[in-house]
Amino acid sequence: MLRVGVFSDTHIGRNIPRVVGEARKHAFREAFKQAINVFIDNRVDYVVHGGDLFEKRSMTPDDAGFVKDELYRLVKNSREKWGKDVKIFIVRGNHDGSPSSCVLEYVTHPLADYLQIIGESIKEELQYYGDGKILVTGVGYHPFIRKRFKDLIGSLSEIVESSKNNQFKILLLHNYIEGVNVIPPYTPEHSIINRDDLEKIRVDIVVVGHYHERSGLKEEDNLKFIIPGAIEAVDLGEKGPFGVYILDVDDSERIQAKFIELTPAQHVALRRVGSEEPKPLQWFKDRVLEEISIFMNELSEKKLPGILKIKVSGTATDLKVSPRIFTEEELRRIREDNPNLLYLEIEEDITPLIKEELGGAMPISREDLVRDLFKELGQEPNIVELIEETSLTLEEKASEKTGLLKDSDRSVFVERWARILLNKVEGCRNED
């Protein structure tokens, strides 16, 4: 029997929200330590990681050293306690960088033969591992994975088909998959793997990173897959529980999966306050205070510090202009009265029932202006591609301090946006 530890999206070095950045970095490290402890205690033979080992933009050399030490601890303790030589396999995620600038290189070493990066090398050649018991291959994150994966079907199939019949075959991926993941809204089709293409690779299980909410072992149309999810809330709206999986594979390659929950270092929650009917502003304020009180009771029960985001939406009956529900002074008092509340964010979207006319025109927020300006562009392919490229460049080159690009990097995208907008305006004129 084989025993495989599975985890993903560990995001070591992530420091969002930045106000409590050090506390969040600590939470991801604590979760990582727990995951390693679980793998040691459960006597795994192999460990696979579904990508986003690091948070490249905010990680430090100390974060790289931490991960190296923890992976070595897994190998060393497993050998000393159980006589097992554990092998570890990791695929590159989008937060680990690109093939030419990948932070996974920080944890590799010629003498660390227990660790292997699976997927493409800097030359974009496929990498894989095989021994008498297991075969592991995969494809790192790619913004245009639909075409990329289709191009790799032949190479992946050749790797899998050349393996021994009794090898347990694992495919590691870090992209969304059609019909497997819950695909977030507005995700462009070119960044989603075609399900039919995936089924052409005859592996025993597909381990899928990138999506942070776990999904247990599933089998559909002879395809088995597992989404381990993140080990800690990466964004404030993500719900747990978070943890790792242990896969037991018998001699007939039947798989049993067990989820083991990790204990978070902080209680993270997103709450919503809203009403379909117009309400007085005080009603929204009271509901927010109730949510804060409920959350503080949860912190007392869990004996944990907390991070809370509340989204407020609706229509206020007693206003002519959009106000803030709470003043900065009121928010400061709430934080002072609740020392276990590490972070509180209230996102407001309150619309006045009666809008005051100002010189015949209503003021418009920056968000509304951007939305109105770009809504006509919608899902045009060149826009979708440009957004994807901009996101990747921000991950690769943005300043850690400001989150912005240098002028030379930014100007390329500004020019492309300007051309698209000018073409759109010209097209509208021609239609008229």
Image (cartoon, grey):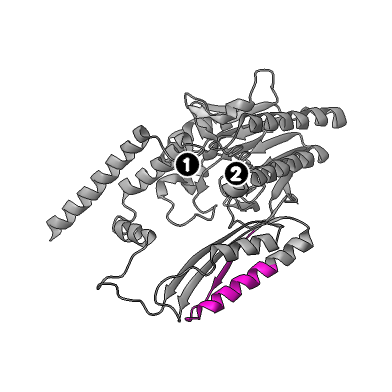
Location of mark 2 (residue): 15
Residue count near mark 2 (Cα–Cα under 10 Å), binned few <14, some 14–19, many ≥20: many
The residue shown at (46%, 37%) is 398
Q: Which mark is residue 338?
A: none
Residue count near mark 1 (Cα–Cα under 10 Å), binned few <14, some 14–19, many ≥20: few
Q: Is residue 326 magenta?
A: no
Dividing the picture into quarters, in which one does residue 304 lie?
bottom right
Expressed as whole percent of the image width and height from the top left, the position of residue 14 reads 60, 42
Q: Is residue 279 left or right of residue 203?
A: left
Expressed as whole percent of the image width and height from the top left, the position of residue 377 reads 30, 55
Circle 1: element type: loop
Location of mark 1 (residue): 403
* Residue 254 shows up from this direction: no
Above-or-below relation of 264 to 349:
above
Above-or-below relation of 35 to 329:
above
The residue shown at (47%, 32%) is 154
- Name the amino acid, label 2: Asn
Quadrant the N terminus occupies: top right
Circle 2: element type: loop
Q: Nearer the viewer, residue 121 or 319?
A: 319
- Name the amino acid, label 1: Gly
**Magenta residues?**
269-294
